[in-house]
């Protein structure tokens, strides 16, 4: 996989290139010893502009070369490892039946213009089903450095084609032998990163694959970055409506150097172009789960590929550019857009703890009002407690009456503290009579007719913590109108209680249930489950709009598209979290849990990333007074943000772009930019036990000079950019 000149010898089309069964050792040894330049390549069809060069074999249609001209990164460099596509078309009695693009000859490879190539493969030869009456046609365009792959499958056979893998890159190479490669995508309001080279993370388990593999899905991120040290490749599913599920798939062939770390997730990739005569290479493909029915034509969602200079910011900027063309600005109540904080409080669990009766909730409201906390996320208020009785939104007699809860909500909100009721419509509790008599009909079914289920959660008692008496969940089908009607009816019960909003927990919690195979639901079979989220959300919004136009819709870390319906995102972070949501749009309210009893680390990261504080003592089962140290520091952070709102709240969050920081210890920093172009740099000392000295460099500082402030010293002091920051503390340098 080391970069260098490509090899001139190609394997004949008749030779099997089946991955994961090993490559021809003799051919691999020969290929490692021979080189090839672009000039030596014959029979190529080339698309080229000032940014990219991409080439296709005129006989097979395989993608033989892919190069970023602006950086001289030859990303696909060995034509003998070129790939085109792959189909999975199970046979009766043998599901393992693939159509391998490497074994097909193209019926047509035609350059339609300087910017467009058309490729067709007809009468596809499958591995175990003979010749299949199918035509796969692809159109590739290159326009201003934007490479777009479109495809269409005409399936004239009696088989269902479950997946089409296209485009397919057979040899993703790093820019240099000592470079680093990682895949990056959005997940849980964060930018996740997974190593590709020189170490590779296997996500699928050694028992399930022949070679290490990792994937990311369109249900959580519409884009994927292949990121090197100072440049990358951006890959996008170019359809925000996601007509089906698509995965970005990486496979490291033939495998790891050693197995001492196995079955752990990481191990080293072999260096060089081959090992034991077998080519070493990284494949990348986009896997479209189309489930193309017999005698049908299916169009693939376009896949956009672009190259960029810089780190992940430059890659995410490409997504942000496209996102601006389709993202609909959601309605968010003004109070939720302002600097404010929350408390999350659970008052009952499935083990019938009945922690706080409804009539005593006003005491919690009083405490929040006294401490400037603007909202309470109330959990476990409905019958059965948290994660029991779903989807019921009835009150629990063990906590009190409907009138007591309704009146408590009204009294608390009259004091300026909003009540946000926790709920979810992803699961149904399988232990209830309601499920056994009716709701089972609306559960997602797998291909065998069985309901897709989840083991549920454990609470409080040793029996449940051991998983013995957990309430098991059926995963419900939002594609079913009958289920949406049930959920909407229960949601109206929540609305009737008069809360200022609700938080949809596990709004992306369909879990492993990506497709539903139940024809009784009135949808196609199979149908992509996530396609039901929008109609479900629209029904809930319509119900709320008739009651309270300013009703807040919040969700547990919704996927970016779903932020249009659940614009306040609740999430959790770690020390390594990358705040991609505020980078995409600083106006997005993102709330983060704080659970430590002197949790300066989490609070500093909240200041750093423009997050909202959610106070959660005793893992959201305590009171604000239970952790006075955390509460006191959080109040100082919010006071600082209110005082310098133009910078730290209304300003554009730029992560680390626009300034630099040098320190004599461990730190993190971020940059904010006001509408007038003035910048603020937040520096967090991440050392637990020692102070640090930090130097902030702001290019071309504005003439009025710099001021230093901190949560504990909010009055501005003139600064030259040099800071002394105590352990576990933060400071801000801003342009006046």
Image (cartoon, rainbow, N blue to C red):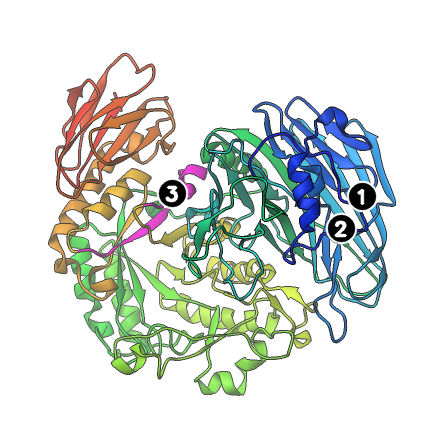
Mark 1 or 3, closer to the camera:
1
Residue shown at 30% from the left, 15% from the top: 702
As for residue 227 lying within the magenta part, the answer is no
Query: Are discs 1 and 2 less than 8 Å apart at CB?
Result: yes
Quarter-of-image position of residue 386 = bottom left
- Residue 638 in the image: above or below residue 558: above
Expressed as whole percent of the image width and height from the top left, the position of residue 583 reads 42, 37
Nearer to us in this view, 81 or 379: 81
Quadrant of the image occupied by residue 113: top right
Alpha-carbon neighbours of circle 3 within 10 Å: few (<14), some, or many (≥20)?
some
Q: Residue at x 50, y 43 (%)?
A: 329
In-image side of 540 versus 397 (left or right): right
Point out residue 93 in the picture as x, y percentages from the top left corner: 74, 76
Residue with the mark numbered 3:
578
Select label 3 or label 2 by which is in front: 2
Give the magenta range. Answer: 576-596
Give the image location of residue 43, x and y in percent: 82, 32
Image quarter of the C terminus: top left
Would you name the residue on which mark 1 appears?
Answer: 60
- The first of marks 1 and 3 along the sequence is 1
SS class of the residue under badge 1? loop
Q: Secondary structure at mark 2?
A: helix
């Amino acid at each position: 996989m080391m970069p260098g000149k490509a090899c001139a010898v190609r394997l004949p089309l008749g030779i099997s290139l089946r991955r994961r069964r090993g490559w021809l050792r003799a051919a691999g040894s020969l290929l490692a010893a021979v080189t090839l330049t672009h000039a030596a390549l014959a029979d190529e069809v080339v698309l080229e502009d000032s940014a990219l060069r991409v080439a296709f074999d005129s006989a097979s249609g395989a993608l033989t070369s892919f190069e970023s001209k602006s950086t001289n990164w030859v990303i696909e460099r060995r034509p003998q490892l070129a790939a085109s596509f792959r189909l999975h078309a199970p046979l009766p009695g043998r599901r393992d039946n693939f159509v391998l693009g490497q074994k097909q000859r193209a019926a047509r490879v035609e350059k339609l213009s300087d910017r467009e190539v058309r490729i067709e493969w007809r009468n596809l030869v499958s591995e175990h089903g003979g010749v299949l009456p199918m035509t796969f046609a692809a159109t590739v365009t290159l326009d201003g450095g934007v490479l777009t792959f479109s495809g269409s499958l005409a399936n004239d056979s009696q088989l269902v084609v479950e997946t089409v893998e296209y485009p397919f890159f057979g040899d993703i190479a790093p820019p240099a032998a000592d470079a680093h490669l990682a895949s990056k995508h959005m997940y849980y309001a964060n930018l996740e990163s997974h190593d590709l080279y020189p170490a590779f993370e296997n996500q699928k388990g050694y028992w399930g694959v022949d070679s290490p593999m990792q994937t990311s899905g369109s249900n959580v991120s519409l884009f994927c970055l292949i990121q090197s040290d100072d440049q990358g490749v951006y890959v996008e599913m170019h359809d925000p409506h996601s007509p089906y599920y698509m995965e970005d798939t990486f496979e490291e062939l033939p495998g790891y150097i050693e197995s001492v770390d196995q079955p752990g997730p990481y191990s080293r990739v072999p260096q060089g172009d081959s090992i034991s005569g077998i080519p070493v290479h990284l494949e990348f493909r986009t896997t479209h789960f189309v489930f193309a029915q017999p005698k049908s034509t299916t169009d693939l969602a376009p896949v956009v590929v672009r190259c960029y200079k810089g780190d992940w910011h430059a890659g995410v900027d490409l997504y942000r550019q496209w996102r601006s063309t389709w993202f609909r600005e959601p309605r968010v109540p003004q109070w939720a857009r302002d600097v404010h904080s929350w408390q999350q409080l659970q008052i009952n669990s499935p083990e019938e703890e009945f922690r706080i009766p409804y009539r005593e909730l006003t005491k919690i409201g009083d405490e929040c009002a006294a401490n400037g906390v603007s909202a309470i996320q109330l959990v476990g208020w409905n019958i059965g407690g948290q994660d029991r009785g779903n989807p019921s939104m009835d009150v629990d007699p063990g906590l009190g009456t409907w009138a007591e809860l309704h009146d408590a909500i009204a009294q608390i909100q009259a004091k300026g503290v909003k009540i946000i009721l926790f709920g979810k419509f992803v699961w149904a509790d399988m232990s209830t009579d309601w499920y056994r008599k009716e709701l089972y009909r609306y559960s997602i079914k797998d291909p065998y007719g069985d309901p897709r289920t989840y083991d549920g959660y454990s609470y409080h008692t040793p029996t449940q913590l051991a998983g013995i008496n957990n309430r098991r969940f059926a995963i419900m089908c939002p594609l079913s109108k009958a289920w949406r009607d049930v959920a909407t009816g229960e949601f109206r019960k929540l609305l009737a209680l008069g809360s200022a909003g609700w938080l949809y927990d596990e709004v992306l919690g369909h879990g492993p249930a990506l497709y539903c195979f139940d024809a009784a639901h009135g949808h196609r079979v199979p149908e992509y489950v996530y396609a039901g989220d929008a109609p479900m959300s629209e029904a809930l919004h319509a119900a709320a709009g008739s009651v309270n136009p300013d009703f807040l819709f919040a969700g547990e870390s919704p996927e970016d598209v779903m932020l249009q319906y659940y614009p306040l995102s609740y999430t959790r972070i770690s020390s390594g979290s990358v705040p991609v949501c505020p980078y995409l749009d600083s106006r997005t309210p993102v709330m983060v849990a704080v659970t430590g009893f002197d949790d300066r680390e989490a609070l500093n990261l909240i200041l750093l990333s423009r997050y909202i504080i959610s106070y959660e003592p005793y893992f959201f089962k305590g009171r604000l007074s239970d952790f006075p140290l955390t509460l006191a520091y959080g109040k100082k952070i919010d006071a600082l943000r209110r005082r310098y709102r133009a910078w730290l709240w209304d300003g554009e969050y730029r992560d680390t772009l626009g300034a630099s920081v040098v320190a004599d210890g461990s730190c993190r920093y971020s940059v904010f930019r006001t509408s007038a172009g003035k910048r603020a740099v937040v520096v967090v000392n991440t050392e637990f036990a020692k102070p640090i000295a930090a130097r902030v460099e702001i290019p071309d500082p504005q003439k009025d000079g710099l001021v230093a402030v901190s949560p504990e010293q909010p009055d501005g002091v003139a600064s030259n950019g040099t800071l002394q920051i105590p352990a576990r503390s933060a400071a801000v340098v801003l342009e006046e």
